[in-house]
């Protein structure tokens, strides 16, 4: 059975072969100990305009060195700035008091009164105070949903 290959498929296949060859070169040069910048300069001399960008060469060099960007854990590093969780007991108590005083109070009004974000008010109500809209069928047992 003979299958016809279109011109576009041939070009795509040739492009993929070209990329695979360049990745092999990056793997070899990385194993040899060349930096990504030096590897890119050497490849640019050979492949000219068809060469991968410097960023792609750096990405593949990191991958072949075992330092893939996906494996780097940025979140574990300590850094200055605002903490991830800005909810404290004082705000929890004030939000609870405002809800007890007026159960129809809007989250926007609580946020404006306490000078915190609407998202933080919503988080405090639903997570810390375990309050929220009751289901219409009457079930609001939080232990079932956790």
Image (cartoon, helix red, strand yellow):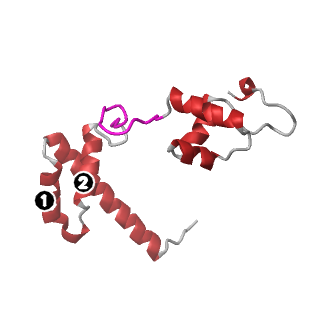
Q: Which residue is drawn at 37% across and 39% down?
A: 82
Label 2 sits on residue: 57
Inspect this view and state whether residue 84 appears: yes
- Magenta stretch encompasses residue 84: yes
| 30 shown above or below 144 | below
Q: Residue 41 carries which label?
A: 1
In which image quadrant can residue 81 be found?
top left
- Compare residues 50 and 131 and report the one nearer the observer: 131
Position in image of residue 104 (x %, y %): 74, 44
Quick one: SS at disc 1?
helix
Position in image of residue 140 (x %, y %): 78, 30
- Compare residues 3 and 48 and report the one nearer the observer: 48
- Residue lying furthest front: 101
Position in image of residue 126 (x %, y %): 64, 35
Position in image of residue 94 (x %, y %): 58, 33
- Residue lying furthest right: 137
Most common secondary structure along the magenta stretch: loop
- Compare residues 143 and 25 and report the one nearer the observer: 143
Q: Residue at x 41, y 67 (%)?
A: 12
The crowd level at tag 2 (other Cα within 10 Å; few <14, some 14-19, many 20+) is many
In the displayed structure image, the side of residue 119 where residue 23 appears, left or right: left
Q: Residue at x 24, y 39 (%)?
A: 65
Cα separation, mark 1 vs mark 2, equals 10 Å
Q: Residue 2 carries which label?
A: none
In which image quadrant can residue 145 be found?
top right
Q: In which quarter of the image is the C terminus?
A: top right
- Magenta stretch encompasses residue 33: no
Q: In which quarter of the image is the N terminus?
A: bottom right
Inspect this view and state whether residue 118 appears: no
Quick one: SS at disc 2?
helix
Chain part drawn in magenta:
72-86
């Amino acid at each position: 059975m003979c299958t016809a290959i279109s011109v576009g498929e041939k070009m795509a296949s040739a492009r993929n072969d070209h990329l695979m060859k360049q990745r092999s070169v990056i793997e070899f040069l990385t194993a040899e100990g060349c930096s990504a910048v030096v590897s890119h300069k050497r490849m640019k001399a050979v492949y000219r305009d068809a060469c991968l960008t410097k960023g792609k060469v750096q990405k593949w060099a990191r991958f072949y060195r075992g330092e893939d960007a996906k494996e780097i854990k940025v979140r574990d590093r300590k850094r200055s700035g605002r903490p991830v969780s800005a909810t404290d007991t004082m705000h929890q108590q004030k939000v609870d008091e405002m809800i007890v005083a007026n159960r129809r109070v809007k989250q926007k009004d609580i946020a404006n009164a306490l000078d915190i974000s609407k998202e933080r008010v919503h988080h405090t109500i639903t997570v810390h105070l375990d309050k929220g809209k009751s289901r219409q069928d009457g079930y609001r047992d939080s232990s079932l949903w956790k």
